[in-house]
Image: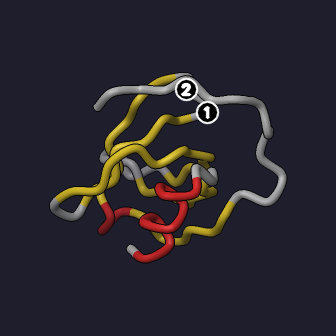
Amino acid sequence: MDLFHRCLKEQIPVEIIYLSEKGEWTKRIVLPRKLDDGAVLAFDLSKGGIRRFRMDRIFAALPAAKANKRKFPTLIA
């Protein structure tokens, strides 16, 4: 959770390995917007929108080293 707090504060994208509700493993690059009750609300760069990711379904998370450095939209959650 500390990684998500830091990346939220510093506006750093996070690369995650995530297990979907359908049981599918996916790799996503997300920009955290809000943390709450065991979940992270984030802008999903691959889907182009806000998504909610449960922390118990995130297998791995690292700052995204090669993420696109373009300006991201300011989103209100």
Considering every residue shown, the one lying at the far right of the view is 66
Task: Decide which of 21, 30 is in the foreground and name it.
Answer: 30
Marks 1/2: CA–CA distance: 6 Å
Q: Which mark is residue 47?
A: 2
Considering every residue shown, the one lying at the far left of the view is 37
**Residue receiving disc 1:** 45
Residue at the spot x=43%, y=77% of the render?
A: 2
Q: Identify the image quadrant of residue 63.
A: bottom right
Q: Identify the image quadrant of residue 30.
A: top right
**What secondary structure is marked by label 1?**
loop
What amino acid is found at the position of numbered circle 2 in the picture?
Lys
Q: Vertical placement of 71 versus 35: above or below?
A: above
29 relative position to 2: left or right: right
Image quadrant holding the C terminus, namely top left
Name the mark nearer the viewer: 1 or 2.
1
Residue at the spot x=58%, y=50% of the render?
A: 11
Residue 57: x %, y % from top left = 36, 63
Residue 39: x %, y % from top left = 27, 56
Task: Decide which of 19, 69 is in the foreground and name it.
Answer: 69
Image quadrant holding the N terminus, namely bottom left
Density class for disc 1 (Cα within 10 Å; few <14, some 14-19, many ≥20) is: some
Q: Which mark is residue 70?
A: none
Residue at the spot x=51%, y=67% of the render?
A: 6
Residue 7: x %, y % from top left = 54, 60
Task: Decide which of 13, 10 is in the foreground and name it.
Answer: 10
9 relative position to 55: left or right: right
